[in-house]
Image (spheres, helix red, strand yellow):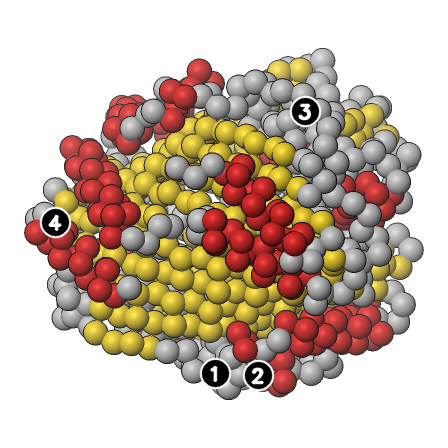
Amino acid sequence: MADLRELAHLACKQAVRMGAECADVTLNRDRSIGVKVEKNGIHDAKEARNTGVSVRAIVKGATAFATSSRIAPEDVREAAGRAAAAAKLAQPDPDFVSLPEPSAYEAVPGLYDERIAQMSVGDLIRTLGDGIDEAREVCPEVVVEADAGLSVHEWVLVNSLGVEAHIRRTGIGSSYFCVVRRGDDVGSFYDYDCAHMLDDYHPEGLGAKVCKDALGFLGARSVRSAVMPVVAGPLVAISLFGSIAGAAGAEHIQRKRSYLVGKRGQRIGPEFLTIRDDGFIPRGMGSGPFDGEGAARKRVTIVENGVLVNHLHGSYTAHKAKEENTGHGNRNRGVSPTNVIPSLGGVLAAEIIRDTKEGIYLNMGGLWPSLASGEISSTVDFGFKIENGELAYPLKNTMIGISIFDLLNNLDAISSDYREEPGQIMPTIRVRSVKVAGAE
Amino acid sequence: MKELLERIRDRAQRMGVQFMDARMFALDATGVSVEDGKAADVGQRRNSAVGVRVLVDDAWGFASTDIITPEALEESLKSAIEMARSSSARVVNAGVVAKVSPVVDTVRAVVERDPRSVLLEEKVRRAADYESAGVRAGQDKISNSIVHYNDWWSREIVCNTHGTLVDQEIMRTMIFAVFTATDGTVRQRAYKVITEQVGYELLDRVSAAEFTEEVAKKVVALLSAKRCPSGKFPVVLDPSVTGVFTHEVLGHNAEADFVFNGTSIIEGKVGQQIASEHVTIVDDASIPRLSGSFSYDSEGLPGQKRTIIEKGVLKGFLHSLETAARFGVQPNGSGRAQDAHKMPIVRMSNTYMQPGKHTLEDLLKDIDVGILIEDAGGGYVHPEKGHYTCMANQGRMIRNGQLAEPIREITFTGVMLETLRNIDAVSRDLVFWPGMCGKGGQSAFTTCGGSYVRVKEVVVGGQE
């Protein structure tokens, strides 16, 4: 089997030989197995094998990519030639300074598990079969859709300044979606488990849990429009914090397309709110020693005690800002977070709900601020009305609307307990005053 | 290439499969990105792969490879069979395939100017010209400007044990502009995308005035639009929003795999009145030039027009070879795969609500307080419940039958069967809007379309 590093060096040298001022090359070799369940039985099982080369050539700051799914030496040389030729035709970018230079990487354990690489489709089928049986024990008339998959991924990056990055990752995961019908009434829910390492993968009980949750969504009603507190459960809260981290990416800031433009150094939330990005959490789903350009990752505190203190950088944005590269870049000049970790509070999630006389609980779905304006207008896809501190009934035809800054200023609780997935800490949060629109 | 696929098909037949198809998919794509005055990013992608799908012991197996050699395809076939055999003990609904006559055809992409013969410098220059024209039209309020140009040449060869051998090329060209405008603390974003199955002549035809200048004027106008109100309102959807609504709300529910799996709210309702009589919804893969069109789907079935709802009555679903067999109907060419690494699944093509008789003014005049919702931004649906959400970038309040103050960033929700029954007027316009649809981890080029449509009531989730 071809050595990916050798091929990457071959392509990189070719790109420079063909006129690139600098270049980087990535090569990947992936294998994945997936199994799909439809209507309580296996529908299909599949295996895919992918290879690919991507050459980025840079001339006067102009960037050109050429990719190919073929990775024989002649193919990677050909891609390099295409990239170099195209880079000469794009328009120069004087803001480009340099690709990342070599630096030491801090090792991140727990990203590759040979046991996963050796697993077979039969292992996935057994897991799914168990999950279907669990769900049907909870409710015999449930309809189960599910997926399980494993992947083995090898990736190499080499650049013309001497960076050489190589990583192998494994992944395993399963998800269940359960639907229960009672006449015209439908309850449904979805949940997942995923990991890099087999010891972190816990699909047992997931089918049963999702089925119970689906039953809980029967009898959905709408509400009367009002202003009330919203309690966001773990999956919703982490997606909110992740979107804030994304909006703090320097590419969005420098391009003036983020609601966080001009906010660095300013208070954007309560003093008890801190949001960190940590790409070194062992076994974390977003973890790794380097970013998409082979630059060493750094831990970054994005929001500290309510104040926006840092942006996330890649090499392009870091040079432009004359700041340190935090190792969050990709080869498209974009910037993205890794594992987003919010601060925790002192009160259990159950207590936050009990303390809420009337409100909305968001179980799953989004609080997705518009990147430009920061406005949030979200449907309560899976949520409950809170009445007298209890989850009273599931909701439909209900929406919430608020700006991100009003949301953060009204954030009055973060739970002490949390849902944990590898690399992710997901607490529950409460926002005390949100516009809720309903159909009643 | 065809001989390679035929050889592996014959091998599969000798191995006793119930059904098999082998698909080769090749892509040659070029992209240019201009941002903030610099066309500094270009990209060229070339890939090819083969996917082999088998039905063995009533179970489906699939394997794919980027290495297109007889040995690699033989390995893929063996792997696909092993996948199927491993699954068969836990199959509850035996895999089936509709019996169809074989199709043998070759379709070449026919365009006026093949983008592959247009120099890259020309594409860079043209994209840069569009961007600079837009920025000039933005009255110094444009804080970020992005224009993308992309062309895709794709070729899919489908070879199966029915005897089908279809070789189809498709050429698509796209221009996309997204501008952000800032005025003090107010920041807004607007965009426009044009994707058609044409060649580079698209750029000869589309002027900056109808593309980036329009986006710039739109985003600058949004800076002074008010925030969206919150509550229940009668609404008029513009054609783009009607299109997204039709695609998300009805289209996905009509995909027969969802219906069979018990995850569509319209299961069991064929022949029933599920919408008002004003509603006729069609999915048509045969409309020339639209980005969702195709001559053949990824199972070698002809692209065709399918009537899903006619005057409010559900007529049928979108079918693949498998779902057609399950429902005892003819397949209607809806089995599409993103590429060779994915199995075909039921997908839409160009889905639209047919026009009615009214003018926009007719739709507005009976509304005391409502919202005209314009410029679709996307949407999604939970098909098992029929709960949908649609997003739009702008709109106008309607007051006493007249268009009033502009508003921005409108999201609305509803329950599909309620909303379809609450459509009480449809205008006589018809506009199509290109997009990409995501389902089951696959993307597909689709188009959606419609007219101005009045809905008695939806829930709008604004901030005011």
User: Which amino acid, by three-letter code, is at mark 2?
Assistant: Glu
Report x, y in % for residue A19: 69, 58
Q: Mark 1 lies on which chain?
A: B
Q: Residue B142, can we see it?
A: yes
Please report the residue visible at 61 percent of the width from the left and 28 percent of the height from the top. A288
Mark 2 vs mark 3: give the one in front.
Answer: 3
Residue B111 — which label? Answer: 1
Dot 4 or dot 2: first in sequence order is 4
Q: Quadrant of the rendered structure where residue B57 is?
A: top left
Residue carrying label 2: B201
User: Which amino acid, by three-letter code, is at mark 1?
Assistant: Val
Q: Which chain carries label 3?
A: A
The verdict on a common chain for dots 4 and 1 is yes
Residue B17 — which label? Answer: 4
* Residue in front for this viewpoint, B457 or B104: B104
Dot 2 or dot 1: first in sequence order is 1
Does residue A422 lie above or below B57 as drawn? above
Does residue B211 lie above or below B382 as drawn? below
Please report the residue visible at 74 percent of the width from the left and 25 percent of the height from the top. A299
The verdict on a common chain for dots 2 and 3 is no
Farthest-out residue, front? A17
Report x, y in % for residue B410: 67, 58
Q: Which chain carries label 4?
A: B
Report x, y in % for residue A430: 69, 28
Report x, y in % for residue A252: 77, 48
Tag 4–tag 3 contact (CB < 8 Å): no
Residue A105 — which label? Answer: 3
Tag 4–tag 2 contact (CB < 8 Å): no
The verdict on a common chain for dots 4 and 3 is no
